[in-house]
Amino acid sequence: QVQLQESGPGLVKPSETLSLTCTVSGGSFSSYYWSWIRQPPGKGLEWIGYIYYSGSTKYNPSLKSRVTISVDTSQNQFSLKLSSVTAADTAVYYCASLRYTSGWYYNYWGQGTLVTVSS
Amino acid sequence: QSALTQPASVSGSPGQSITISCTGINSDVGSYDLVSWYQQHPGKAPKLMIYEGSKRPSGVSNRFSGSKSGNTASLTISGLQAEDEADYYCCSYAGSSTSLFGGGTKLTVL
């Protein structure tokens, strides 16, 4: 059973960089693509990107210029950085495990963390 | 990438069946049998209900079923129960190792 927990500041100023970390426990770190997904208040889910334990990444084209996802396998953690944020980046940010072998689906999710962009 | 198209809302009475559609294009839903469905209760994280179009994870009720025809995937919930009231999202593999979510459907149990 994989468990994920997001952590990071809940308030970020406009034009600054949003930084979040997801800590993973249980399961094999090499069995999934470790993903970030966000949900603006009252809206739907948006895939941000993912990283493999080797460090290879894939980003949503609409966010690619502002997103960096990194991994620290020694700590079983992966992180999200989103630069030049605006109010439109206010959302609940989820980390999740993407099963990519025998399918393509998010089977474990963190509880989510609300990040508000405001001065 | 545009979001997959889902109806904004559906409703049904307890015991009835409802179906939620998820329409994409040839390069996503139509090209792969890799649609998954998620249930989200207010203030909670999404929960996987269906994967690979029609498979249920362990622990998910067999009242939930999935199918696909052409560019449209569907989630059917039979024997509606009050606890099924939630938001439902589809997600498809969209080629080039990317994902695409639907806009979400609010299910109301009358």
Image (spheres, rainbow, N blue to C red):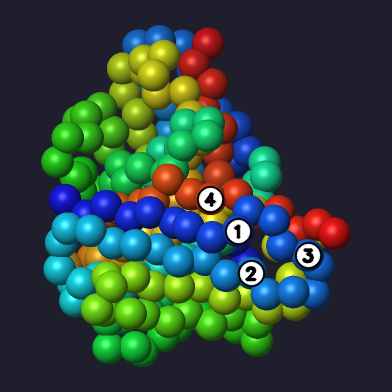
Question: Which residue is located at x 24 percent, y 78 percent?
Answer: A74
Question: Which residue is located at x 36 percent, y 80 percent?
Answer: A71
Is residue A45 something one can see in this rendering? Answer: no
The chain that hosts pointer 4 is: A
> Distance from label 4 to label 2 (Cα)?
12 Å
The residue carrying mark 4 is A113
Marks 1,4: beta carbons within 8 A: no
Q: Position of residue A50 (x, y in %)?
A: 41, 75
The residue carrying mark 1 is A9
Marks 4,3: beta carbons within 8 A: no
Which of the 4 image quarters holds residue B61? top left
The chain that hosts pointer 3 is: A
Q: Position of residue B64 (x, y in %)?
A: 28, 33
Helix, strand or loop under label 1: loop
> Distance from label 1 to label 3 (Cα)?
11 Å
Helix, strand or loop under label 4: strand
Q: Nearer the viewer, residue B100 or A95?
A: A95
The residue carrying mark 3 is A13
The residue carrying mark 2 is A18
Same chain shared by disc 2 and disc 3: yes
Q: Position of residue B62 (x, y in %)?
A: 20, 30
> Distance from label 1 to label 4 (Cα)?
9 Å
Same chain shared by disc 1 and disc 4: yes
Which of the 4 image quarters holds residue A14? bottom right
